């Protein structure tokens, strides 16, 4: 099994607060890697460090041997790392279809003149973008509402649309930040199957932040536990569940 | 008809010209950037045309090229405005919201004061006797009109192209657009340059139209006027700036019989329009169209 992502002593301090402190871990090609921890443990900050949205205070992150730390977000996205956001950040004033078209930006190259003068190359590209967008909308089950504004979708549908938008990047790595938040039990079960399905279909490696423990235990191959910015355990779900440090972080010491 | 055009030609051409200037704000706004730099580039474009049209150095060019010198003036104004926009845009577009608006107003002021003090721009007096392209005011519709149609086609195509989608994604959520692989700085600068080039070309067309050019062409007042065009017209579609610019340019003339009180009415129209049409005229018309469409659908038994 090859190592795809390697974090080495990744840190981020906000003033005196150590949001992420000396975190090192590896993610293998093709696995579903869960990231759990109590509120404020630094999970989302870690995702922001990995996608370049927040600059690191220290440490490095490598993807297939290439250094990601220091690169702007759009370059990291262009290398095949897609993400969703905990507090959904869709392009709310654009339609579902446009949302999924936008992030095909990195896989297309038609420029201003090509687009405006409708050159054959740009027209062919636009056709591919359109087809791909519809394909993805069918996959996430929103094809019949393609022209509706993203703002009008329900919470669960917005989360699915965010996943669809991230998949349009044709990523190799997908970072999902609390994809099940706000979903009911049935939707959560559906999500588990859906995440497995897209991993298989797109040959993805998935990192997942999630609070819902049964979902994480069921879905993830390996789990990392963060507490107050520190990595306290990494391993397969069964072992992590028994780890005394993890029990202490969640339930307090006896 | 001919009398009507002779009497109102100047106003009609001015409406088209102001609509074009309003559109120059539209491109940065597609990226969610409020830039008020257009009067600066408009003034710059006008100076380029006025200088090429009057100074001794270009006399042999003017003699040998004839009317062809005019399109060359537009081209030169567009290119010079574009280059300046690139230089100004890269640092300025690091600013957001109201700070960008202030920085671009400062840019307009700096350019105005420079033009006020240079010899080549005629100092405070400006440049007189800019050569005319046409005999009558009305005929200038043949320069501004095609440019407007061209820009509408350009905007229409841009809206559904890859670059246009990137613009709109940045407008909706710059951070999310960045995380989806779009370089925000690059596209914001591109939109700014497109707007600046348009304003520059309009300026170069306007110098012959107005016959004279001076530092009063690009002022803070003009920045605010163009802002009103997009606010009243609406900034979500290309029709907004077009309607806003044309209607607000015409309003003082339409209200002329009211003498001094017309300024009060003018102000009231702005206030009420911004209260009752927050999406601008284009937004209100779009909503009307949707509602009418829906009720027709209802009568036909549709959903």
Image (spheres, rainbow, N blue to C red):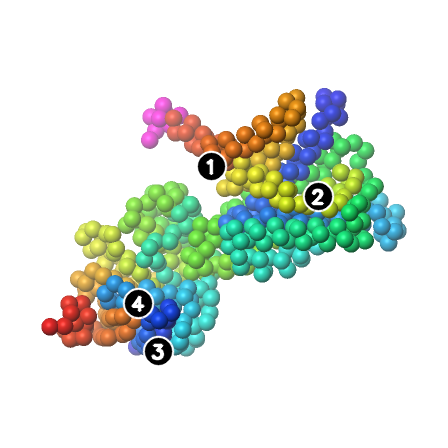
User: Label 4 lies in what chain?
Assistant: A
> Picture coordinates of residue B101 (x, y %)?
56, 50
Please indicate whether residue B231 sits to the left or right of residue B300 in the image: right
The quarter holding residue B135 reads top right
Please indicate whether residue B62 sits to the left or right of residue A17 in the image: right
**Residue in view at x 61 percent, y 44 percent:** B223
Q: Which residue is mark 1?
A: B278
User: Label 3 lies in what chain?
Assistant: A
Whether discs 4 and 3 lie on one chain: the answer is yes
**Residue most toward the left?**
A254
> Picture coordinates of residue B100 (x, y %)?
55, 53
B4, above or below A179, in the image: above
Instruction: Give the quarter of the figure containing the N terminus of chain A.
Output: bottom left
Q: Which residue is mark 3?
A: A9
> Picture coordinates of residue B194 (x, y %)?
61, 51
Total numbered labels = 4
**Magenta region, residue range:** B296-303
- Does B300 lie within the magenta span? yes
Q: Secondary structure at mark 4?
A: loop
Q: Which residue is mark 4?
A: A42
Q: Which residue is mark 2?
A: B217
User: Label 1 lies in what chain?
Assistant: B
Please indicate whether residue A16 sits to the left or right of residue B284 in the image: left
């Amino acid at each position: 099994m090859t190592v795809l992502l390697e974090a080495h002593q990744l840190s981020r301090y906000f003033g005196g607060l150590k949001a992420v402190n000396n975190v090192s871990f590896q993610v293998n090609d093709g696995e579903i890697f869960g990231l759990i921890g109590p509120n404020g443990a630094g999970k989302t900050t870690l995702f922001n460090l990995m996608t370049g949205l927040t600059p690191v205070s220290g440490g490095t992150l490598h993807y297939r041997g290439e250094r990601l730390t220091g690169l702007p977000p759009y370059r990291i996205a262009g290398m095949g790392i897609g993400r969703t956001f905990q507090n959904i950040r869709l392009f709310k004033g654009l339609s579902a279809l446009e949302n999924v078209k936008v992030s095909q930006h990195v896989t297309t190259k038609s420029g201003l003149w090509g687009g405006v003068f409708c050159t054959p190359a740009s027209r062919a590209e636009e056709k591919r973008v359109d087809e791909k967008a519809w394909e993805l909308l069918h996959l996430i089950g929103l094809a019949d509402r393609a022209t509706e504004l993203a703002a009008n979708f329900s919470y669960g549908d917005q989360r699915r649309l965010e996943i669809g938008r991230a998949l349009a990047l044709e990523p190799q790595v997908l970072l999902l930040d609390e994809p099940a938040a706000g979903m009911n039990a049935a939707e959560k079960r559906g999500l588990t199957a859906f995440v497995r399905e897209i991993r298989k279909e797109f040959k993805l490696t998935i990192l997942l932040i999630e609070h819902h423990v049964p979902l994480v235990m069921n879905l993830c191959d390996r789990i990392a536990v963060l507490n107050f910015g520190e990595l306290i355990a990494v391993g397969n779900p069964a072992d992590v569940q028994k780890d005394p440090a993890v029990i202490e972080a969640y339930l307090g010491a006896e | 008809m001919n009398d009507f055009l002779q009497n109102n030609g100047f106003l009609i051409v001015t409406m088209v010209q102001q609509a074009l200037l309003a559109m120059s704000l539209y491109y940065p706004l597609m990226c969610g950037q409020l830039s008020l730099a257009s009067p600066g580039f408009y003034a710059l474009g006008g100076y380029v045309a006025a200088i090429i049209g009057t100074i001794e150095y270009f006399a042999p060019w003017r003699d040998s090229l004839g009317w062809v010198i005019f399109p060359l003036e537009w081209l030169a104004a567009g290119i010079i405005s574009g280059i300046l926009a690139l230089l100004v845009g890269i640092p300025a577009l690091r600013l957001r919201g109201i700070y960008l608006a202030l920085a671009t107003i400062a840019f307009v002021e700096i350019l105005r004061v420079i033009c006020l003090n240079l010899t080549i721009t005629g100092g405070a007096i400006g440049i007189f006797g800019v050569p005319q392209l046409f005999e009558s005011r009305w005929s200038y519709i043949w320069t501004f009109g095609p440019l407007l149609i061209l820009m509408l086609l350009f905007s229409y195509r841009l809206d559904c192209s890859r670059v246009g989608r990137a613009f709109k994604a940045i407008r909706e959520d710059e951070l999310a657009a960045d995380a989806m692989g779009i370089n925000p700085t690059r596209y914001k600068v591109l939109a700014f340059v497109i707007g600046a080039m348009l304003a520059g070309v309009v300026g170069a067309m306007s110098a012959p139209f107005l016959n004279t050019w001076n530092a009063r062409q690009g002022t803070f007042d003009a920045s605010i006027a163009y802002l009103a065009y997009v606010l009243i017209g609406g900034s979500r579609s290309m029709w907004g700036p077009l309607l806003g610019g044309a209607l607000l340019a015409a309003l003082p003339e339409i209200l002329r019989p009211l003498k001094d009180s017309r300024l009060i009415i003018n102000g009231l129209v702005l206030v009420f329009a911004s209260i009752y049409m927050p999406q601008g005229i284009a937004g209100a018309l779009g909503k009307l169209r949707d509602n009418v469409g829906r009720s027709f659908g209802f009568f036909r038994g549709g959903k």
